[in-house]
Image (spheres, rainbow, N blue to C red):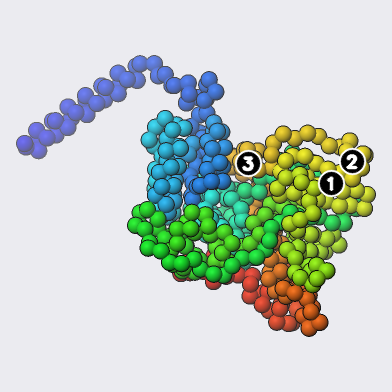
Amino acid sequence: MSIKNQNAVNRRQFLRRTAAVAAVAAVPLYVNGKVLGKDGAVPPSELILLGGLGINARGGHDLSVFMSNPDVRFVSICDIRKDRREAVKNQANKKYGNNDCTMFRDMFEFYEANPQMDAVLIATGDRWHTMATIVAAKAGKDVYCEKPLSLTIQESRAVEKAVNRYGRIFQAGTQRRNIGNFQLAAKLAHDGKLGKLTEVHANTLSPGVTHDWLPAEPEPAKDDVDWELWLGPCPWRPFNRTYVSGGWRGHYDFHGGGILEWGTHTVDLCQWANQSDETVPVEYWATFNEKGDKTSTVEARYANGVKLVCRNNGWLGLGTCSARYVGEEGWVETGDSGRMEVSSDTLRKELKFFGMPGTSPDNHIREFLDCVKTRKKPASNAEVAANAHIASHCAKIVWDLNPAKLSDSAKSFSLKFDPVKEEFIGDNEETRTANRLKSRAMRDPWRC
């Protein structure tokens, strides 16, 4: 065909298309009411597009709550396990009646393929929480991260710095800050109903962990379980399916022990009751029984003189993750059952019934979603969470460094901590060791 004929065809095509556009313009334009938010539908502009990393067990419950909110659309899952990727994809597709949820094994590919995503739910094992949050913040995503968010003091602060640097909304999964009975207990302390506060007690578990490795097993296919990605920043260890199935808890390489495990909930509550969200205790010591054996209890002192007690026994049976606040004129104790006990009839008149258990993330997730829209800091923001974690890490370190049994030649000691410099104070071997334990080496190429 000649150039002349080509131009004629192009002109004819142009004229036909122009006529078609004019004809469409002459027809009244109708917009589906759902786009405008009619009949209870959420307009696309108000939808929060959510992705997830490492979702299983607790994370699966979180995801169900997220998807129960009409302004959330779950769009993509990233997991090193094929069975978990497929399970979450099926959960999302069943919810929305389509096959749109995408799957990824590598989180960098996950973010590259989902530039429109607003936020992520991080529910991996503990070893990944810090790095996954930092990568998400750098990718421009808001983060809801299950606890604990770190394995060290240094990681705790690295999370806060990354969230602030990239201007993201962060909510740690310490949902009791949005549960009625825990809110009321803190209010009694804040309003002076207990008198001057003297002690705050956190329900924690045994701090001990093992440094042993599980025996090596043949590695599965990479697409089934990517062992290198499962380990992430942790030291290399031989594959064992028990780790991948949730049996990583109690192993030092992947877990921070029982004070961190529950203290990120209950030490956090004590920080809140003492109005110490911007700081941590300044001195820590382990306790011993009458036989001279070390117990699982660690005590600490805030700069204002209030004592923090991390203990796993002596509670009133009000549910897991209990907390007790003691003042000069009374005390209150509460736990996940929603029930509360107080020291006097006067305080009992302040009590109310709360039906939501302390394990429910419903209110906490809703607050996060609202903050994604308003850009206000949520209750368990990065600074609040970092300080609660740092206090828990300090308690674990002093427990580790105390002898297992007292003797004439081995006396217990305390560690003093500077909350501003974030270092232990003193010129002795225990203090130097404590400062070395503020961080852990990360496997290449990970840094935080």
Q: Is residue 299 above or below residue 223?
A: below
For the question of whether residue 60 can be seen, the reply is yes
**First-in-chain label (2 vs 1):** 1
- Which residue corresponds to mark 2? 347
Residue drawn at x 24%, y 26% is 17
| Residue designated by label 1 | 332
Front in this rendered view, residue 95 or 309: 309
Task: Give the quadrant of the C terminus.
Answer: bottom right
Amino acid type, mark 3: Pro
Q: Residue at x 59, y 50 (%)?
A: 146
| Amino acid at pointer 2 | Leu
Q: Which residue is mark 3?
A: 361
Residue at x-position 93% and y-position 49%: 329
Hey, which quadrant is residue 208 in on the image? bottom right
Q: How packed is label 1: few (under 14 Cα within 10 Å), some, or many (20 or more)? A: many
* Residue at the spot 92% in from the left edge and 53% down from the top edge: 328
